Image: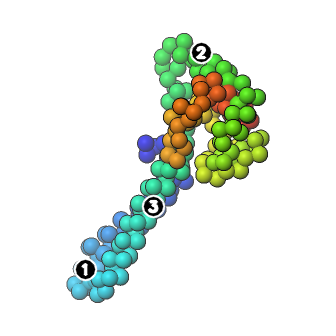
């Protein structure tokens, strides 16, 4: 899971964790050696420690909720080369089973634009990833729409399989993936 987090997410976690760890080491080992009466102001010490803890938990929550995985499709791209070529055919046809024109209507009717930005659809949602920037493959769109992830709910019971294929074909075709 950690390897799948975006570079931004990894950087945020590393910086916040580094600050928290540095604070813990300095206040537990270094300062008490030089000043046995440390901390002089227990309230300030506890408050700053609590602020760093809350910052770390907020960073973990933010990364888990809003950071999309960097290369979700990588395992499926490597699997066909490691196994038989027959697995490649369903993956390729999965992306072509959907109708992009019908998918545009599904994107609008399912309310995708309320959370996602997609220029072709005139959508500017900011809760989910910007699809123009993320450029998800059709397979990744099918996975996310079917199963959800983080703040994204599953649409498995709300959209039928063809509608999911259609919206995946639409999104992947307009973002150029």
The span from disc 1 to disc 3 (Cα, nearest Å) is: 29 Å
Q: Quadrant of the N terminus?
A: top left
Q: Which residue is mark 3?
A: 58
The first of marks 1 and 2 along the sequence is 1
Could you say which disc has been placed on residue 89 in the image?
A: 2
Q: Where is mark 1, residue-wise?
A: 32
Q: Nearer the viewer, residue 94 or 12?
A: 94
- Measured in 3D between alpha carbons, the distance from the residue under mark 1 to the one under mark 2, in whole angstroms, is 65 Å
Disc 2 crowd rating (10 Å Cα; few below 14, some 14-19, many 20+) is: few
Label 3 to label 2, Cα distance in Å?
A: 43 Å
Q: Give the answer, above or below, for where 151 lies relative to 40.
A: above
Q: Residue at x 29, y 83 (%)?
A: 42
Q: Quadrant of residue 54?
A: bottom left
Specify which label sits upstream in the sequence, 3 or 2. 3
Q: Residue drawn at (50%, 30%), measured in percent from left and top?
A: 75
Residue at the location (66% across, 42% down)? 111
| Viewer-side label of 1, 2 | 2
- The residue at 58%/21% (across/down) is 91
């Amino acid at each position: 899971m950690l390897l799948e987090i975006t570079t931004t997410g990894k950087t945020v976690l590393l910086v916040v964790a580094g600050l928290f760890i540095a604070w813990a080491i300095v206040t537990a080992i270094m300062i008490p050696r030089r000043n046995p009466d440390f901390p002089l102001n227990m309230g300030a010490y506890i408050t700053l420690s609590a602020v760093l803890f809350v910052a770390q938990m907020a960073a973990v929550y933010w990364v888990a909720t809003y950071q999309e995985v960097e290369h979700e499709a990588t395992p499926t791209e490597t699997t066909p080369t490691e196994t038989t070529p027959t697995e490649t055919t369903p993956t390729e046809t999965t992306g072509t089973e959907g109708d992009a024109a019908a998918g545009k209507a599904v994107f609008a009717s399912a309310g995708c634009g309320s959370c996602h930005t997609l220029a072709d659809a005139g959508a500017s949602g900011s809760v989910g990833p910007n699809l123009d920037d993320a450029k998800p493959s059709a397979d990744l769109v099918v996975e996310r729409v079917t199963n959800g992830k983080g703040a994204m709910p599953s649409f498995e019971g709300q959209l039928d399989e063809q509608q999911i294929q259609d919206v995946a074909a639409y999104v992947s075709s307009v973002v150029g993936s």
